[in-house]
């Protein structure tokens, strides 16, 4: 009988600890998301997260590879338009595409250089983590219902992206690559 009571007590304690851990899990990320929602939509009152889960993460090296692939795709498209405009005698547009091709090639070279300069540890560092959440709250006199929203958050707690469409979550997140912003300052 004592073993059953002890087992029930241990299971109850374990359940309470698990519930508390789940409740405080992602506390920093939730606060960062709440702050970002308030910043973009106005003062949010009583924001309650119904769900909040990590659905992915991206390393700096993976982000570099994604950006390289994007610029390769852009280069191919710009080259096709350049060829089409050149063949059609639309020299002004062809000149614009030639400039775009040169920029694409420069960005690819710069990204490759960044990748080669970074150490294995830097390339393996987490650039951002992806979260999916649902929340409810009050905006002045209206109700906020955020169902199946997504956020990309840096390890330091900066919300880089807050969207409803997961396809748009990683747009513009090259900023997590050291030196990436500087690539565009010269333009």
Image (cartoon, helix red, strand yellow):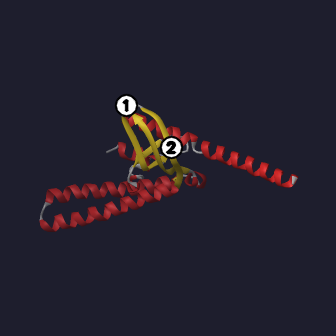
Identify which residue is drawn at 31% across, 65% down.
Answer: 76
Whether residue 116 appears in this view of the structure is no
| Rendered-image quadrant of the N terminus | bottom right
Name the element at disc 1.
loop
Name the element at disc 2.
strand
Q: Quadrant of residue 16?
A: top right
Identify which residue is drawn at 38% across, 33% down.
Answer: 42
Residue receiving disc 2 = 49
Classify 35 as above or below 147. Answer: above
Q: Nearer the viewer, residue 135 or 37?
A: 135
| Rendered-image quadrant of the C terminus | top left
Q: Position of residue 123 (x, y in %)?
A: 55, 54
Which residue of the protein is positioned furthest toward the bottom in this rendering?
Answer: 87
Q: Position of residue 112 (x, y in %)?
A: 46, 57
Q: Position of residue 15 (x, y in %)?
A: 70, 49
Q: Is residue 153 left or right of residue 109?
A: right
Q: Position of residue 24 (x, y in %)?
A: 61, 42
Q: Is residue 130 left or right of residue 89?
A: right
Residue receiving disc 1 = 140
Label 2 vs label 1: CA separation? 18 Å
Badge 2 vs badge 1, beta-carbon distance below 8 Å: no
Identify which residue is drawn at 42% across, 49% down.
Answer: 147
Q: Nearer the viewer, residue 6 or 89?
A: 6
Q: Nearer the viewer, residue 74 or 90?
A: 74
């Amino acid at each position: 009988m004592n073993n059953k009571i002890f087992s029930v007590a241990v299971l109850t304690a374990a359940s309470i600890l698990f519930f508390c851990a789940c409740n405080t899990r992602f506390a920093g990320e939730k606060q960062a998301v709440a702050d970002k929602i308030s910043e973009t939509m106005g003062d949010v009152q009583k924001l309650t997260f119904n769900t909040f889960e990590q659905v992915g993460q991206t390393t700096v090296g993976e982000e570099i590879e994604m950006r390289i692939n994007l610029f390769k795709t852009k280069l191919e498209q710009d080259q096709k338009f350049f060829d089409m405009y050149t063949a059609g005698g639309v020299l002004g547009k062809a000149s614009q595409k030639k400039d775009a091709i040169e920029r694409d090639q420069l960005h690819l070279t710069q990204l490759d250089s960044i990748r080669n300069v970074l150490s294995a540890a830097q390339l393996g560092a987490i650039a951002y983590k992806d979260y999916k959440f649902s929340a409810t709250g009050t905006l002045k006199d209206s109700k906020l219902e955020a169902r199946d929203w997504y956020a990309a958050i840096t390890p330091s707690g900066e919300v880089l992206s807050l969207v409803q469409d997961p396809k748009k979550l990683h747009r513009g997140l090259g900023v997590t690559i050291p030196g990436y912003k500087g690539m565009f300052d010269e333009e």
